[in-house]
Image (cartoon, grey):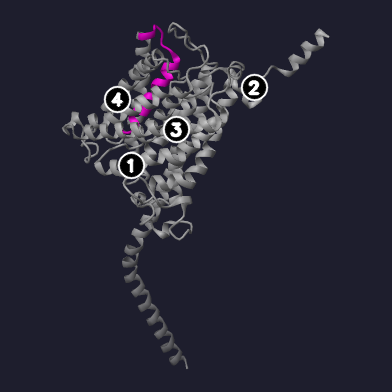
């Protein structure tokens, strides 16, 4: 009995031992197979986390724009400006989801996308990464983060383009006119040129380089703003009959300064986030971004001091933004020294541009056209001058052995996007004016848009003091 049991137990031990040995022998092979899958999953998780954090920073730029624009304008229009900057993200979210994202990134022709409206697939089912992107968003297949992360990150960029317009047309545009134009811009106009460059369109195929949107976002917003300013005309009292230029100071440089710093912070999501992955390139892009902004501040301070006789704070703030806009296209392909040069030129450009637009009686209360249009163009061309193969080997500018080829491609892109956006903007502003009108009445402008349009003041008289005064008078 004991013997049989012993034999039986021995057999069990032998089988167990063999099984354990087999598992131990098989473990390395299984681990080798599981390791890449686990690493891939971890990479996607880290990439997604980075893209979303970067998107949150870009979203926070809405606060920066609201502060800069309201600070640079008069107190009687503050609520109106804040309302525009608040509602524009809601408008952009709905219109970009419905049509903009599909027109920009959907598979289609070299001119525009035709698929993926409302984030739906060919069978009208919600798209997930499991469905793949072939036949829907092939232009986004290069990055492995979830579709929702790609959509959100591109959404905050689209909203930025619409926000640029707000400051340029401030203090005299009808609230509903701005809402309608913003909806049309994000739904139709912005996505078309975006498709040309980022969505698999003809400019991208040609080799046009715009890493984070000097042209795609800033120039498009700047062109739309410039055409809107021309349609609206200047604010009452801005220019005299004999060509005099009358300064209309903003009501709070404190708000404007805080807004400029918020935007500077947000740009560290705007540019490095465009890697769409948690890569080693983030550090380089953040550094070129920071250095261009710093150089823009230094140059704007010095140039304003030389041209205007004082180191104008409004120019200093716009100098930082000019440097940031200019480095947005080349941030991933230029060295740090070249990023400083790009920022220095941007800082001087923005000051001279503000002065020139004023001489032409183009009234832009916050300098949005000078910051975003002029320096969006400059930053785009800077790729063709300063792109360094030692930083990224697939693009070379004139000053780093590439000849004029890349500069020529960049110039074609600037001209094509500029011409299309200016003409399309004129059509959209004409539609807006025909449907709703564009400009408030002279009386409404004189009183201020807060009272005349919004029915709410940002800085109402203190109620307690007012009641005390009335009581004393009685």
Does 19 sit left or right of 5 as displayed?
left
Task: Identify the residue at horizontal 29%, vertical 25% (top origin).
Answer: 342
Residue 379 on image: x %, y %: 31, 29
Q: Would you name the residue on which mark 3 appears? A: 266
- First along the sequence among labels 2 and 3: 3
Mark 1 residue crowding within 10 angstroms, few (<14) / some (14–19) / many (20+): many
Q: Left or right: 450 with respect to 203?
A: right
Q: Nearer the viewer, residue 169 or 89?
A: 169
Res 342 label:
4
Residue at the bottom extreme, as displayed: 1
**Does the CB distance between marks 3 and 1 fall below 8 Å?**
no
Would you name the residue on which mark 2 appears?
451
Helix, strand or loop status at disc 3: helix
Foreground: disc 3 or disc 1: 1
Question: What whole-number distance in Å separates the C-alpha atoms at marks 4 and 1?
Answer: 25 Å
Q: Position of residue 392 (x, y in %)?
A: 24, 39
Q: Which mark is residue 196?
A: 1
Tag 2: Cα neighbours inside 10 Å, few (<14), some, or many (≥20)? some
Q: Position of residue 104 (x, y in %)?
A: 39, 44
Sooner in the amino-acid sequence: mark 4 or mark 1: 1
- Work out whether 232 lies above or below 42: above
Magenta residues (range): 307-330
| C-beta proximity under 8 Å, tags 4 and 1 | no
């Amino acid at each position: 009995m004991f013997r049989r049991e012993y034999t039986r137990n021995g057999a069990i031990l032998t089988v167990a031992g063999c099984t354990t040995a087999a598992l131990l022998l098989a473990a390395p092979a299984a681990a080798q197979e599981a390791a890449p899958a686990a690493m891939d999953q971890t990479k996607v998780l880290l990439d997604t986390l980075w893209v979303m954090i970067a998107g949150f920073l870009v979203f926070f730029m809405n606060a920066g724009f609201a502060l800069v624009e309201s600070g640079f304008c008069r107190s009687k229009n503050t609520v109106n400006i804040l309302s525009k900057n608040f509602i524009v993200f809601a408008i952009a979210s709905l219109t970009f989801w419905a049509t903009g994202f599909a027109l920009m990134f959907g598979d289609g022709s070299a001119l525009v996308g035709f698929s993926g409206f409302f984030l739906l697939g060919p069978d009208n089912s919600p798209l997930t990464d499991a469905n793949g992107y072939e036949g829907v968003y092939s232009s986004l297949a290069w990055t492995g983060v979830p579709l929702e992360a790609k959509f959100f990150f591109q959404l905050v960029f689209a909203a930025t383009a619409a926000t640029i317009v707000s400051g340029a047309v401030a203090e005299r545009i009808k609230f509903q006119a701005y809402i309608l134009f913003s909806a049309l811009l994000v739904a139709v106009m912005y996505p078309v040129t975006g498709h040309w460059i980022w969505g698999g369109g003809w400019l991208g195929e040609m080799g046009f380089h715009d890493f984070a949107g000097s042209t795609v976002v800033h120039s498009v917003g700047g062109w739309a703003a410039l055409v809107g300013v021309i349609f609206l005309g200047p604010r009452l009292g801005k220019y005299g009959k004999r060509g005099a230029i009358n300064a209309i100071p903003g009501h709070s440089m404190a708000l404007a300064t805080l807004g400029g710093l918020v935007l500077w912070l947000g740009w560290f999501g705007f540019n490095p986030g465009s890697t769409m992955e948690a890569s080693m390139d983030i550090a380089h892009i953040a550094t070129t971004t920071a250095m261009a902004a710093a150089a823009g501040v230094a140059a704007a301070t010095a140039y304003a001091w030389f041209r205007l006789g004082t180191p104008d704070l409004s120019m200093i703030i716009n100098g930082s933004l000019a440097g940031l806009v200019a480095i947005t296209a080349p941030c991933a392909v230029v060295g740090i020294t070249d990023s400083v040069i790009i920022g220095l030129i941007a800082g001087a450009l923005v000051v001279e541009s503000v002065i020139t637009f004023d001489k032409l009686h183009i009234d832009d209360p916050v300098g949005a056209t000078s910051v975003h249009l002029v320096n969006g163009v400059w930053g785009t061309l800077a790729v063709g001058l300063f792109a360094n193969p030692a930083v990224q080997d697939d693009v070379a500018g004139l000053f780093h052995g590439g000849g004029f080829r890349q500069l020529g491609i960049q110039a074609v892109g600037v001209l094509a996007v500029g011409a299309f956006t200016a003409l399309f903007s004129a059509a959209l502003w004409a539609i807006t004016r025909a449907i709703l009108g564009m400009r408030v009445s002279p009386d409404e402008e004189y009183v201020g848009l807060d009272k005349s349009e919004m029915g709410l003041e940002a800085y109402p008289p203190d109620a307690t003091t007012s009641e005390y005064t009335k009581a004393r008078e009685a």
